[in-house]
Image: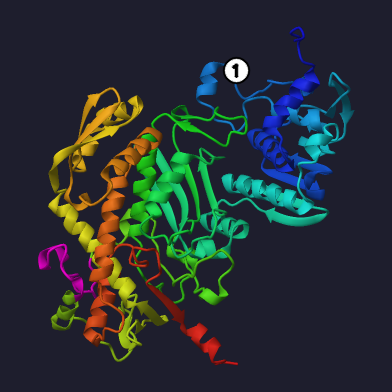
Amino acid sequence: MSRIHLLSPRLANQIAAGEVVERPANIVKELVENALDAGARHIDIEAEQGGIKLLRIRDDGCGIDKDDLALSLSRHATSKITTLDDLEAVGSLGFRGEALASISSVTRLTLTSHEQSADTAWQVSAEGRDMVANVSPAAHPVGTTVEVRDLFFNTPARRKFLRTEKTEFSHLEEYVKRLALSRYDVAFSLRHNQRTIHSLRPAARPIDREKRVAALLSPQFIDSSVHIDAEAAGLALQGWVGLPTFSRSQGDMQYFFVNGRVVRDKLVVHAIKQAYRDVLYHGRHPAFVLYLSLDPKLVDVNVHPTKHEVRFRDGRLVHDFLFRTLHKALGDVRPDNQPNGSSPSELAGGLTSSVMPVSGAAAGEFSEQTRLDWQPNQQARLSSSATPPWSSAPSNFANQAPARADIAEQMNVYGAMNRTALPESPSADMPPLGFAIAQLHGIYILAQNAGGLVVVDMHAAHERITYERLKIAVDQQGVQSQPLLVPVNLSVSEREADTAEQFAEEFRSLGVELARVGPESLLVRQIPVLLQQAEVPQLITDMLGDLIEHGSSDRFLAHRNELLGTMACHGSVRANRRLTIPEMNGLLRDMEATERSGQCNHGRPTWTQMTMPELDKLFLRGR
C-alpha cells in the first residue's frame, strides 16, 4: 500500500460532487437555493439539451462581494453559518459550502455577480488542475448569474450514466416545481432550448397561490382538494390535500415542505398514509402539497448532503400532529353545494371541483365526485355533532343493535321515521345529496339535487355508515380484553424488549398485557377480544417495529378496523334489495352526517354527480 497523501483540490471536489451532483437537476436545485438565500425576488433558469450542454441561472439577489468571489468556489466556504449554534438552528436552504466547488469541478462554471453597494460587476471561473480562481471585471445588473456548461466533460464515465435529454429535463423541471411551490413570493421563469416552459409571477394572495399550484400540478388537484390550516404544540401545518377520489397510480403528486425545504421523510410518509388508510383505494397514492413550520432547533437538516432528509427531535409529536390534522380534515368533508353564482375567490377559501367521469379521467387519476364547499376555518367546518336543518338526526347504531347484528335490518325503520319528503321544486334549503327519485337495477340510487343528478352506490354508502357506527360503538364500550389460558412467549431483540417496557401503558390501553421475562423475551398474557383469532405475536412484533422507527403504531387499531370493516360489509344492504323512497332518502341523510362518506371502507367512491350543463352537453341542448 502506498503512503498517505493529500488529495488534489480537483479530485477532492469531484468526490464531493458524487454526493451533490448526479444530474443537471441537482445543479439547478443548489444554485436556485443559493439565489433564494441571497434574497432574490426573480429567478430565471435557462437550459439547453436537458441542462447537459448549458444551464444559466440568473437572480436579482444581493450579489457577492468581489473579495469573496474566489473564496465562493472553495470547499466548505459559506456565508450561511459561522458557529455550531448556527448549524443547530439553520434557517437558510444552503449551509454546507460544497455546492459551487463540487459543480465547478465537473463543469465549465462561470459566476458573474454585482453586489448592491459595488460600482461594477465581477466574474470568476476556476480553471486548471488546481482549480485556480480567475477574477475579472464584467458587465451585469445587481444580482448574480451562474453559467454552467458541459456537465461531466472531464469525467466521461459519469456522463455515460446520464439519460436522454427528455428524461433529464423532466427531472430538472420537477426540481423547479418544488422550488416554485416552496416560495410563492418569488417569480420563476424556466426556458428550455429557447422555449418558455414556465413563467410564474409572485403569488401574494391565496387565490394566486392556488393558481400557481394549479399551473404546476393540475387544475383538477386544486378543484379536488381540501385546504389545511392547523396549529398546535408549536407546530403549524398548511397546504392542500387531495380528496381520496383524486388519487394517483403513483406517488408523483406529493410535496412536503419543512420550514420551506422540500423533504421526503419516512415519518411524514407514514403519518400521511395512516390518515388516508380508511378512505384510499388499495394500490392508490394520495396527492398533497403541505407545509410544516416549526422551530428550526427542533429539526436537524444536516443529515445528508442533498438535504432531502431531516430528523425531528420529537418525531412522535410531529407524527401524531400530522396524522390527527389530516385525519380530521378528511373526516370533516361533507357533500355540500356552492351558492349559485359564487366563484372560488368569493367563498373565503372554498374550493370548487368539476365532475371528472371515469372515461375522461387523466391517466393515473381516480374519478372525482362533485363540488365541495370547504371552509378551512374550524368555526366553519361541519362537525359530526352538528345537524343541518333539513336533516333528521342519524339513528344511534350503538343503542339500536349489538355490534354483530345484521345492520341491513335497520333499514326497515327508515320508512317509519319522519324524513323530509321530495319537494315539488328545488329550493334553497335542498340538502347536498338531494332527494331520491328512483332505484336503478337494485344497485344505484338516483337523486335530484340543486346541481343536477346524484348517483349513489347504496351498498358502498351503507357500508361506510355502518362501519363508522361500529367504530363509535366499540370506542364507547372501550377495549374488551381476555386473559390467555396459556401465555404466549415471544423471542425479540433487546431493543424491542426495551421498547415494550417503555410503551407498556400504550399496550395496556389497547388491551394487551406484556411482561418482560428476560433480556430478549416477552410474555403475552392478555389480548383484545376482537383480535382473539388474529396472529397476535406477529402483530406485536410489527407494532414494536413501528414504535422503534416512528414512535407510534396503530397496528392493533388497523386490525380491529379491518374486522369491523368486514362486519360492515356483510351487514350492509345488498344489491337487488328494493328500497322505498323514504328508505333511500334516509340513506342519503345519513351519508351527509357521516364522516368520510364519500368512500366506502375499501376506498371506492360511494357517489358521484352529473351537473345540468354536463347532462345538457350529452344531449346537445343549447346548440
Residue placed under numbered mark 1 in the picture: 82
In this rendering, is residue 416 above or below 563? below
* Horizontal and vertical percent position of residue 275: 38, 51
Image label count: 1
Return the residue nearer the eye: 400 or 595: 400
* Horizontal and vertical percent position of residue 113: 79, 31
Residue 398 shows up from this direction: yes
Q: Quadrant for residue 9, please give it.
A: top right
Q: Quadrant of the N terminus?
A: top right
Return the residue nearer the eye: 350 or 445: 445
Residue at 54 percent of width and 92 percent of height:
619
* Horizontal and vertical percent position of residue 25: 70, 43
Residue 234 shows up from this direction: no
From the viewer's perspective, tell me whether residue 80 is left or right of residue 104. left
Q: Which residues are magenta?
A: 387-408
From the viewer's perspective, tell me whether residue 618 is left or right of residue 604. right
From the viewer's perspective, tell me whether residue 382 is left or right of residue 367. left
Crowd band around label 1 with a 10 angstrom C-alpha radius: few (<14), some (14–19), many (20+)? few
Check if residue 394 falls in the magenta segment.
yes
Q: Quadrant of the C terminus?
A: bottom right
In this rendering, is residue 268 above or below 307? below
Return the residue nearer the eye: 42 or 541: 541
In this rendering, is residue 160 above or below 289? above
* Horizontal and vertical percent position of residue 45: 75, 46
The three-letter amino acid code for the residue at tag 1 is Thr
Check if residue 531 falls in the magenta segment.
no
Judged from the image, the secondary structure of the residue bearing numbered disc 1 is loop
Residue at 45 percent of width and 48 percent of height:
238
